Image (tube, helix red, strand yellow):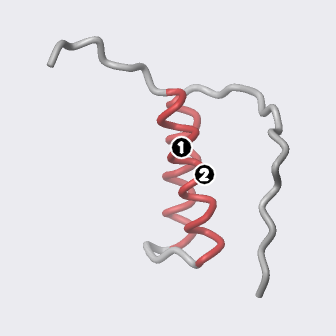
Amino acid sequence: MLHIMSTTVEAAPERSAAEVNEEIRALWLRSGGTLSVEQREEYQRLVLEWAAAAPHSTRAA
């Protein structure tokens, strides 16, 4: 099966890390703990969105 990735950037409304986290939790609950290929793709997208929305630590290394 051929998958074509879009090269355009879609502007999505910014959500808080907490909002994205709730969606991640709901995805896991719906899946019963085992993600399908499509659900894994959604999970990866959500994790990236969550990471972008999460507050960054300013702790020195």
| Secondary element at image label 1 | helix
List the residue tagged with mark 2.
Answer: 45
Quadrant housing residue 57? top left
Q: Where residue 30 sits: x, y (%)?
A: 57, 67
Position above or below: 29 against 8 = below
Mark 2–mark 1 distance (CA, rounded to whole Å) = 5 Å
Position of residue 61 measured from the top left corner of the image (x, y, whole percent): 14, 19
The image position of residue 53, as x and y in percent, is: 53, 27
- Residue at point 53% right, 51% down? 24
* 42 lies left or right of 44: right
Q: Amino acid at mark 1?
A: Leu
Checking the image for residue 13, the label placed there is: none
SS at badge 2: helix
Left or right: 56 as drawn, with respect to 14: left
**Mark 2 closeness class: few <14, some 14–19, many ≥20 residues within 10 Å:** few
Disc sitting over residue 48 in the figure = 1
Callout 2 touching callout 1 (CB < 8 Å): yes
Q: Quarter of the image holding residue 44?
A: bottom right
